[in-house]
Amino acid sequence: MTTTDGAAVQHPSVSTALLGVEGRSRPLLPLLPLVATMLLIAVSFSSFFPELLLNPLFVAGYVVLGLTVLSALLAPWHRLGPLAPLLLPMLGFVAVGLSRSGSQSVLDVMGLLAIFPAIRLATADKFRGVVVGTLSTAAIIAVPLILSPAPINSQQWARLTVL
């Protein structure tokens, strides 16, 4: 398509239309599936299990998630280098890990949300991202097991292996 003076019409890309010219919130886009899923879980499960909102680890996971979203929006990621935004999925692992630890009595499957930051790391930094994503996913299960005063049973080792 051309204009009346013969110049080609330039249509903005979807990311430019959504984020603006500078794209300051571009690091937020890969966080959206994790944020949406965790918010859905918080709203739906806290109405059935209000004790979740009283668990400090569960709440801390959501605080970390909120701070991650704020930093994605406010930090000058474009000035910090191409790998700097990969700190955001690492914070996503922290949010998932804390929330999982705080909700094990109700939401043992919450650890599956680690797939979102793991995919982000794997697609952004290939081999290193896959290694870091895999180790981080294992850590959100292994660290609470190791820090727990109770002995580790075979069911817990099986969960770690499967996840």
Image (spheres, rainbow, N blue to C red):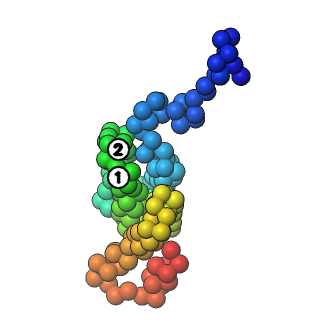
The N terminus, quarter of image: top right
Q: In this view, does 37 lie to the left or right of 94?
A: right
> Measuring 49% from the left and 81% from the top, which residue is drawn there?
161
Q: Determine crowd level at label 2: few under 14, some 14-19, many 20+ residues with C-alpha closer than 10 A.
A: some
Labels 2 and 1: the sequence-earlier one: 2
The dot on residue 77 is: 2
Secondary structure, mark 1, is helix
Up/down of 105 relative to 88, above or below: below
How far from the left and from the top, in percent, is residue 37? 51, 52
User: Which residue position holds label 1?
Assistant: 84
The answer to which of 19 and 38 lies nearer the viewer is: 19
Q: Position of residue 162 (x, y in %)?
A: 53, 78
Q: Height in image: 5 above or below 26?
A: above
Query: What is the number of the mark on residue 21?
Result: none
Q: How far apart are marks 2 and 1 (CA)?
A: 7 Å
Q: In which quarter of the image is residue 3?
A: top right
Q: Where is residue 29 in the image (x, y as percent from the top left)?
A: 48, 45
Q: Which residue is drawn at 46% across and 50% down?
A: 31
| In the image, residue 100 above or below residue 78 | below
- Residue 119 visible to the viewer: yes
What is the residue that sits farthest to the top in this orientation? 4
Determine the image quadrant of residue 91.
bottom left
Q: Is mark 2 on a helix, strand or loop?
A: helix
Task: Name the outermost residue toward the right.
Answer: 1
Q: Do residues under tags 2 and 1 come within 8 Å of each other at their CB atoms?
A: yes
Q: How crowded is mark 1: few (under 14 residues within 10 Å), some or many (20 or more)?
A: few
* Place of residue 89 in the rendered image (x, y in percent of width and height, measured from the top left): 41, 57
**Residue placed at 46% from the left, 88% from the top?**
154
Amino acid type at circle 2 is Trp
Q: Is residue 54 visible?
A: no
